Image (cartoon, helix red, strand yellow):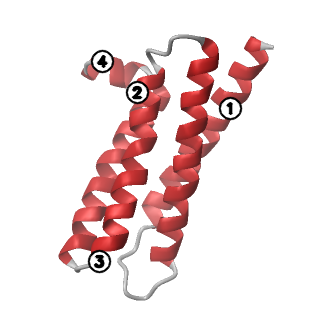
Amino acid sequence: MDNNKINENLIVKLSFDFSLMIIEYAEILEQKRKFVIANQLLKSGTSIGANIWEAQNAESKANFIHKMKISAKECEETKYWLLLCKHSSQYPNNDNLLEKIEILQKVLNKIIATSKRVVS
């Protein structure tokens, strides 16, 4: 999938852009020596997009739904780490990331629900 494909698919674009934002935030955390949370956020936050990317070449509708559900779970984990950062006085502001993950979750949930209806 090239740059055009990223821009043509809403969920791919949202998750790709979110991953870039997570990378930047993790780098800021590392500069502040918050290595454990930075690593957790980097893993779960970029895994969202990796699974969505992989779902674009799913072998079946069921496989597509499965990959999207994994992405939804990674969204939940990432949101947890972001909320920990938000509520800790020692971490930089991440309200923008929390807003973006809410949007990602809504779009993902809609895709999963719609895909399930199509399969049934």
In depth, the one of 119 and 88 nearer the eye is 119
Residue density around tag 4, few if under 14, some if 14–19, many if 20 or more, within 10 Å: few
Q: Is residue 74 above or below residue 13?
A: below
Secondary structure found at label 1: helix
> Which residue does the numbered mark 1 point to in the structure image?
110
Q: Return the x and y of residue 105 as percentages of the image width and height.
A: 60, 44
Distance between mark 4 and mark 3 Cα atoms: 33 Å
Decide if residue 92 is on the left or right side of residue 83: left
> Which residue does the numbered mark 4 point to in the structure image?
1
Which of the two discs, 4 and 3, labels the residue nearer the N terminus? 4
Secondary structure found at label 3: loop
> Which residue does the numbered mark 2 point to in the structure image?
53
In depth, the one of 23 and 61 nearer the eye is 61
Q: Return the x and y of residue 84 as percentages of the image width and height.
A: 50, 75
- Residue drawn at x 23%, y 80% as measured from the top left: 32
Distance between mark 1 and mark 2 Cα atoms: 17 Å
Label 4 is placed on what type of residue?
Met
Outermost residue, right side: 120
The picture quadrant where one finds residue 61 is: top right
Residue density around tag 1, few if under 14, some if 14–19, many if 20 or more, within 10 Å: few
> Which residue does the numbered mark 3 point to in the structure image?
34
Decide if residue 67 is on the left or right side of residue 23: right
Numbered disc in front, either 1 or 3: 3
Label 1 is placed on what type of residue?
Lys
